[in-house]
Amino acid sequence: MLVTGTNTAKPWNDQSVLTKLSVAGTVCYVLWGCLHLFAAYAVYRVGSALDPGMVRGRVLQDSWNLLFFGLTGITVAVTLNIRNNAWGYWINLGVLALADTGLILFVLIPGYMPLWPGLAGPVLWVAGWVLTTLAYRRAPPRATSIASRA
């Protein structure tokens, strides 16, 4: 169902409301993404120093994954989360949760990385999630069309 208000039709779930909370959540997600871009480069440098073989390939694949987790988080944040869009909310919640859950389970819990700065990513993820949740829940009611009221 589409709602028409001005000259453009918008999906019913596009709140398109810029708030302080949605901007703060976006900032957290962008910082999370930048942290992952930095981590991708660091892991790439480690992988490049390894002898050719399966271990090198897997480490370089990890670098690739970190790169695209970071780019996805940033892109969704600046295009959707900032406008308090429901699709952006769920995409970044899912993608960032998957990325950081792996870090927590396979790197931090076994002790392969110190808790600080290891928890920097999860802290930014949770902060972004809390802020975007508050922004989404406090957004003004969505506009509805006359046809949807019938």
Image: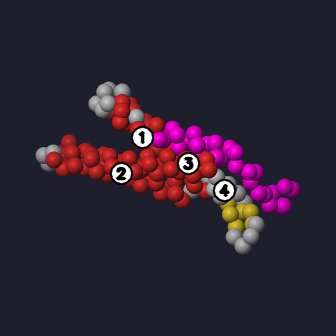
Tell me the residue that label 4 is attached to: 17
Q: Secondary structure at mark 4?
A: loop
Structural distance between the alpha carbons of marks 4 and 3 = 13 Å
Tell me the residue that label 2 is attached to: 37
Q: Secondary structure at mark 2?
A: helix
Give the magenta part as a residue range: 124-150
* Marks 4 and 1 close (CB-CB < 8 Å): no
Structural distance between the alpha carbons of marks 1 and 3 = 16 Å
Structural distance between the alpha carbons of marks 4 and 1 = 26 Å
Q: Earlier in the sequence, mark 2 or mark 1?
A: 2
* Tag 2: amino acid: Leu
Q: Position of residue 150 (x, y in %)?
A: 86, 56
* Tag 4: amino acid: Val
Tell me the residue that label 1 is attached to: 121
* Tag 1: amino acid: Gly
- From what the image shows, is residue 5 above or below residue 58? below
Q: Which residue is painted at 36% across and 30% down in the image?
A: 115
The local crowd at label 2, few if under 14, some if 14 to 19, many if 20 or more residues have their Cα within 10 Å, is: many
Is residue 109 shown left or right of residue 84? left
Tell me the residue that label 3 is attached to: 24
